[in-house]
Amino acid sequence: MPGYRKLGRPTAHRKAMLRNIVTDLFREGRITTTDCRAKEARRAAEKMITLAKRGDLHAKRQVLSYVYDEDVVKKLFDEIAPKYAERHGGYTRILKLGPRQGDNAEVVFLELV
């Protein structure tokens, strides 16, 4: 049994989707998505923030290999990571919004604390 959710997608599609969600989260600060996607994206986003807190060149290259947009990476290192300098984990929050009209999937806000 894997330590992650497959989200009903092939591996490449799933990874690309999670990278897009994390990139949008850092760009916007808050996104709307389903509960399962938010829980998986949170894992990746917290790792990226922890890397950005290190702030060295190797960490920047590791984040650039995951996050699609270079401007978002710059924002992550210059604005987002310094906010969490004193915090050890728990950089994101999931707020439940209720079921989605079409398929009754649990919809949530995924946001930076």
Image (spheres, rainbow, N blue to C red):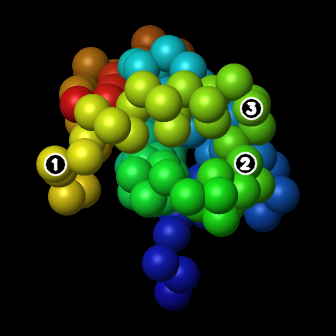
Q: Is residue 31 above or below residue 62?
A: above
Is residue 59 rendered to the left or right of residue 66? left
Q: Secondary structure at mark 3?
A: helix
Q: Position of residue 108 (x, y in %)?
A: 34, 27
Report which residue position mark 2 lands on. Answer: 64
Amino acid type at image mark 3: Glu
Q: Dot 2, how many residues are within 10 Å of its Cα: few (below 14), some (14-19), or many (20+)?
A: some
Residue 55 at least partly seen = yes
Is residue 12 rendered to the left or right of residue 47? right
Report which residue position mark 3 lands on. Answer: 70
- Residue 86 bears which disc, if any? 1
Amino acid type at image mark 1: Glu
Q: Is 67 or 2 nearer to us in this picture?
A: 67
Spatial CA span between label 1 and label 2: 24 Å
**Which residue occupies 51% across, 38% down?**
77
Pointer 2 with pointer 3, Cβ within 8 A: yes
